[in-house]
Amino acid sequence: MRIAVLGWGSLIWNPQQLDVTGAFEIGGPPLPIEFTRVSGNGRLTLVIDERYGTACPTYYAVSGSKGLDEARENLRIREGMTHVNGVGYVDLRTGEVSARVKERHPHAIPVIANWAREKGFGAVIWTALASNFAEVTSRVYSIDEALAYLGELPSEKFALAARYIRMAPLQVQTPFRAAFLGRWPE
């Protein structure tokens, strides 16, 4: 079975041990993406966010794994997740969709499934982590609050956060990214 791996952030420039048969290429489904997840090291990272996200082009690569479970486990390891439930998937053969995806970004499901059918994939996987900005920062997400959060980070954490934002693919243009680059151009 041909399995697509979707990406829009660090998977593109730093796939590490992710098992894909070639480089990521532009042409994945447009998805609502924004920097609304606070990672363990304080960075704001890109996630599918149906509330605050902006439709952005995504990238895809063909998984080197033969089965869906193997591909999901490989992405889980690459992302450093403790459980495979954070890996979203759509299995076009069975119609099965991961429970986390139904919970976190249900409107993305038909967009991803239709794209996969058009491209001839049997399944698609992606990082389906939730936005956690409010939970981690005790602030309601807004561009101003996200900028304030970054401005309060210690310099070494700010440098990591800034690098991630600047390294995101150029096609991933979000309102937050524009505001960030306007405030901290270099």
Image (spheres, helix red, strand yellow):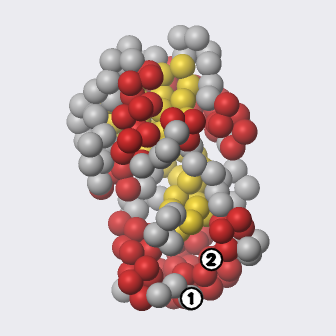
Three-letter residue code for mark 2: Ala
**Which residue corresponds to the image point at 65% horizontal and 60% vertical from the top-left?**
132
Residue 65 place in picture, x, y as percent = 32, 24
**Which residue corresponds to the image point at 40% horizontal and 68% vertical from the top-left?**
164
Write down the residue under mark 1: 152
Three-letter residue code for mark 1: Glu
46 or 180: which is nearer to us?
46
The extreme front residue here reads: 82
User: Residue 149 vs residue 117: left or right?
Assistant: right
Element class at badge 2: helix
**For residue 168, which numbered disc appears in the image?**
none
Write down the residue under mark 2: 146
**Which residue corresponds to the image point at 53% horizontal and 68% vertical from the top-left?**
44
Element class at badge 1: loop
* In the rendered image, the vertical position of residue 106 relative to residue 178, given as above or below: above
- Mark 2 neighbour density, 10 Å: few (under 14) some (14–19) many (20 or more): many
Residue 21 place in picture, x, y as percent = 24, 31
23 or 128: which is nearer to us?
128
Q: Can residue 108 be seen in the rendering of this structure?
A: yes
Residue 168 place in picture, x, y as percent = 40, 62
181 or 105: which is nearer to us?
105
Instruction: Name the image quarter holding residue 155.
Output: bottom left
Image quadrant where one finds the C terminus: bottom left
Instruction: Name the image quarter holding residue 67.
Output: top left
The extreme left residue here reads: 22
Image quadrant where one finds the N terminus: top left
